[in-house]
Amino acid sequence: MTLEVRDLHKSFGGVQAVSGVSLSVAAGELLALIGPNGAGKSTCFNMLNGQLRPDRGSVKLRGQEITGLAPRRIWRMGVGRTFQITATFGSMTVLENVQMALLSHARRLYDIWNPVSKQDPARAMALLDRVGMAGQAARPCGVLAYGDLKRVELAVALANDPSLLLMDEPTAGMAPAERVALMELAARIAREGGIAVLFTEHDMDVVFAHADRILVLDRGKPIAEGLPAEVRRDARVREVYLGT
Ligand code: ADP
Ligand code: MG
């Protein structure tokens, strides 16, 4: 199993943000973590990538305990993430951004005498091709449309050769058609690359269309888990989340 999470807990002061969350994601599988605002989704993501230390519980990546490790170490072990606010360098080109990420993956970022421009662009171009951005490789990231930036960000995450990809609301701020396209891309990348993907998404049509399984949180607690068809039928989910 790529990701195995057992009984995660996190509180902030008096607020129990996450309370007893367990989940697993296999290679090539997409698990959607859903729930109303404040359900604890981002807190879960932040514990998985090391930004927050869990109060209790364990996180295993390919059988190895990573609970409480620093973000940088977790990233090095092959956990990629996309950010809600894009994390590309606006004045650098699309290609340079991906080359930079490849450099970083090679852990040579500290080698200041090895400028990004001297990196072999072939691998970066191959990654851009995977996300449908090869045609815009020479443009500065700063001029890209939002949906295209998200694709570049995906290429940047893939440069790290992740076994697990964490996507916290990857489609926030996107038009519906862009949303569908980005999730289709994420699904294809997961299947082709055998990458485990954990994502959150507000648009239920997108979730039901692309998730292999869904875990529903409400006020920090898991209330349902299963195949999209099962979760859609679940009475408690309908009441708490779908409002029907
Ligand atoms: P979601 O991503 O599902 O909307 P969050 O994980 O962001 O939910 O938040 C879960 C709960 O934890 C909310 O009540 C939120 O206010 C609280 N919370 C999240 N982060 C912090 C923090 N850094 N400090 C205090 N409370 C927080
Ligand atoms: Mg959130």
Image (cartoon, rainbow, N blue to C red):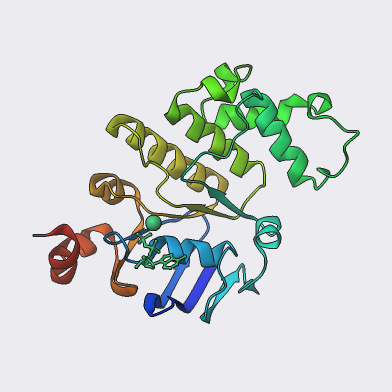
Q: Quadrant of the C terminus?
A: bottom left
The percent coordinates of residue 139 (x first, y second) are 60, 17
Work out whether residue 25 or residue 44 is closer to the camera in this orientation and state it. 44
199 shown above or below 154: below
Q: Is residue 71 left or right of residue 222?
A: right
Relative to 107, is 127 above or below?
Answer: above
Q: Position of residue 126 (x, y in %)?
A: 64, 29
Residue 155 location (% of width, % of height): 58, 36
Residue beneath the point at 43% across and 75% down: 22
**Which residue corresponds to the image point at 23% horizontal and 63% vertical from the top-left?**
231
Residue drawn at x 55%, y 24% is: 142
* Vertical position of residue 86 compared to residue 234: above or below: above
Residue situated in front as seen by the camera: 139 or 27: 139
In percent of the image, x 69 and y 58: which residue is there?
72
Q: Is residue 2 visible?
A: no
Left-right relation of 234 to 85: left
Expressed as whole percent of the image width and height from the top left, the position of residue 172 reads 36, 42
Residue that lies at the very extreme toward the front in this rendered image: 13
* Residue 140 figure quarter: top right
Q: Quadrant of residue 65?
A: bottom right
Residue 162 or residue 112, whichever sits in front: 112
Total labels: the figure holds: 0
Query: In the displayed structure, does residue 106 sit left or right of residue 6?
Result: right
Residue 48 placement: quadrant: bottom right
Q: Residue furthest right?
A: 113
Q: Quadrant of the N terminus?
A: bottom right
Which quarter of the frame holds ligand 2? bottom left
Q: Kindly tell me whether residue 216 is visible in this rendering.
A: yes
